[in-house]
Image: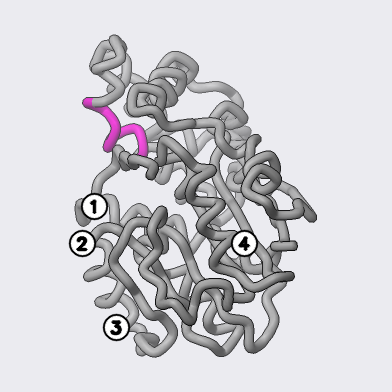
Amino acid sequence: MSSSHYIHGTSPEEQQRLTAMNHLLNERFLAQAALAPGERIVDFGAGLGQFSRAMAKVTGVPVVGIERSNEQILEAKRQADADGEAHLIDMRQGNAEIAPLTDGEWGAFDLAHARFLLEHVSNPLFIVRTMVRAVRPGGRIILADDDYDVMRLWPEPPGLAPVWHAYQRTYDRHGNDPIVGRRLVQLLHEAGAQPRRNTWVFFGGCSGQPDFEGYVANLVKIIEEAMDAIVETGTPRETVQALLDVLATWHRRPDAALWHGVAWAEGVRT
C-alpha cells in the first residue's frame, strides 16, 4: 500500500483552480493520448473528472474515474450534470492502490491513465503496477506528472527560487516526490510494462498569449494554498507574500515568460 497526501485539499477555491487548469491543458493531453473510438479507459486519480469526460467524448465509451475524495466526486458529478455529460463518466470512490474494479474489469481496459497523481503518493510504483493489472495484454498505460524542478520564469521574479524550492520540500516532508515526472519511464519498466514513448506537454506561455494570465494565476494559487506548509519548512511568511505581490503584476511585463512542462510517458502491457 502507498500513503498519499494532497497538500492543496478539496476546498471550493482548489476546485476552481483545477477546473481552470483543465481548460488550459486538456486539449494538449488529448493530442498526446491518440485515443481511438471504442476504447475502454480507467482514469486513476480522476479528480473532478473533466479530463475523464474529455477522453470519453473521443472514445464514445464512458470512462471509469477512480477518486478517493468524496468532495471531489460530488463536484465532478455536479459539473458533469451541469454540462449534460453525466453519461460520459462512471465515478467510483476508492484509493488508486486498490482500485474499485469488478472481477470482470481487471485486465479488460484498453487504457489506464493517471495525471498529477503519482507526485502525491509515497509509493508510485504500487499504483503503476495496479494500472498495468487493469489493462488487457497490449493495453496502454499513460502516466503524466510534474517535475517541479524544470519550471522557469523569466525575467525571474525576485524571491521565486527560495519559495519554489521550499514548496518542493513540502512534498519531501510527506514522503512524496516533486520530481517524479523524470521517473515515469522507469516506473513503467519496473511495473512490468514495456515503455513505448515519452515526451513533454508544454504548460506555460508568454506575454501576448491570451491564456498567459491563466498560467500565472495557477502558479499563484498553488503558492497561496501551500503558504502554511511552505512556512513550516522555515521560509518566512513575509518572503512568500512578497513573491505573491510581485507575481500579481509580473504577468503584465511585455517580456514575461513561464516555461514548464508536464512529463508524459506511455507503455504497454506485454
User: Quarter of the image holding residue 223?
Assistant: top left
Q: CA distance from mark 1 to mark 4?
A: 23 Å
Q: How many marks?
A: 4
Mark 1 = which residue?
10
Q: Nearer the viewer, residue 29 or 211?
A: 29
Is 72 drawn above or below residue 249 in the view shown?
A: below
Nearest to N terminus: mark 2 or mark 3:
2
Q: Quadrant of the N terminus?
A: top left
Q: Residues within 10 Å of mark 4 (few under 14, many from 20)?
A: many
Mark 4 = which residue?
29
Element assignment for label 1: loop
Q: Quadrant of the C terminus?
A: bottom right
Mark 3 = which residue?
82
Label the magenta part by its dominant secondary structure: helix
Task: Give the residues drawn in magenta, as a range.
Answer: 222-228
Cβ atoms at labels 1 and 4 below 8 Å apart: no
Cβ atoms at labels 1 and 2 below 8 Å apart: yes
Is 46 drawn above or below residue 175 in the view shown?
A: below
Which of the two marks, 4 or 2, is nearer to us in this view? 2
Q: Which residue occupies the extreme front position in the image? A: 103
